[in-house]
Structure formats: structure tokens, C-alpha cells
Amino acid sequence: MSKKPPKKEEVAPAPSETQKTEEKKEVKPQKVEKVRKEKKKRQEKGAHALYKIEGDKAARLRPTCERCGTGYFMGDHNDRYTCGHCGFTRYKRAEK
Ligand SMILES: [Zn+2]
């Protein structure tokens, strides 16, 4: 036993009340708060969101990728479906 780790002396002084007030002065003035919409929390969608159970069958709510095959769902966009795996895009038919 030759070496001993040097003991660290706790030197951090507890801030007194006068120091606290000084710290407050240093705080930058807060920017004028803009009217911000609350961040929408993205709902975590699991795989269950892609299926709809009808009776004892599971119906797929999204088309599957033609390239990647079943198991790769395509993202539902406004006018198209896209595959996040290969980038395949299929445009929806204009329904009229
Ligand atoms: Zn794909």
C-alpha cells in the first residue's frame, strides 16, 4: 500500500444569500415570449396502428410496398404512399 488517492476536499462554498441576489442580476433578460403553439406530441404509433382487427382477422390499413413485399408498410401521405424502406412512391388515384 504505497499510493493513496488524494482526498478531495470539498471546497465549494455554499452560496450565501447576498450572492444569490447577485446571480439574479446576471440572468439575461428573457426574450419576449412569442405566442407559440404548444408542441404537438407525436403520438407513438406502433405496429398495431397499421392493423385493424375485424373479428379474428387483422386487416391492414396501409398498402404494403410492392418492392419490399409484405411487411413493409407504406406511409400514408396526402396524395401518395411512400415506402420508407426503399423510397418507392405510389400516387393515389384521384378519386372523383
Ligand atoms: Zn419498399
Image (spheres, rainbow, N blue to C red):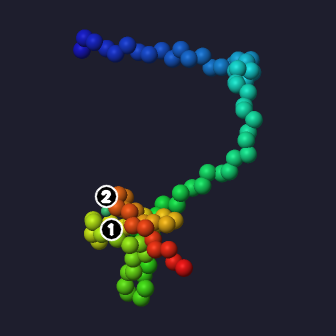
The quadrant of the picture occupied by the C terminus is bottom right
How dense is the environment of label 2, judged by Cα within 10 Å: few (below 14), some, or many (20 and up)?
few
Pick the front one: 67 or 30: 67
Q: How many labels does the image show?
A: 2
Taking the image as shown, residue 14 lies to the left or right of residue 91, namely right
Query: Going 27% across and 65% down the picture, which residue do you hit?
Result: 68
Instruction: Indicate the quadrant of ligand 1 in the picture.
Output: bottom left
Callout 1 amino acid? Cys
Query: Going 65% across and 19% down the picture, which residue do you hit?
Result: 15
Label 2 residue SS: loop
Pick the front one: 64 or 35: 64
The percent coordinates of residue 13 (x first, y second) are 60, 16
Callout 2 amino acid? Cys
Query: Going 27% across and 66% down the picture, which residue do you hit?
Result: 67
The circle drawn on residue 86 is 2
Disc 1: residue Cβ within 8 A of ligand 1's nearest atom = yes
Q: Mark 1 points at which residue?
A: 65
Label 1 residue SS: strand
Pick the front one: 80 or 42: 80
The circle drawn on residue 79 is none
Residue that sits furthest to the bottom in the current view: 55
Asked whether residue 7 is in view, the answer is yes
Residue that sits furthest to the top in the current view: 2
Asked whether residue 51 is in view, the answer is no
The quadrant of the picture occupied by the N terminus is top left
Disc 2: residue Cβ within 8 A of ligand 1's nearest atom = yes
The percent coordinates of residue 73 (x first, y second) are 36, 67
Q: Do the residues labelled 1 and 2 touch (CB within 8 Å)?
A: yes
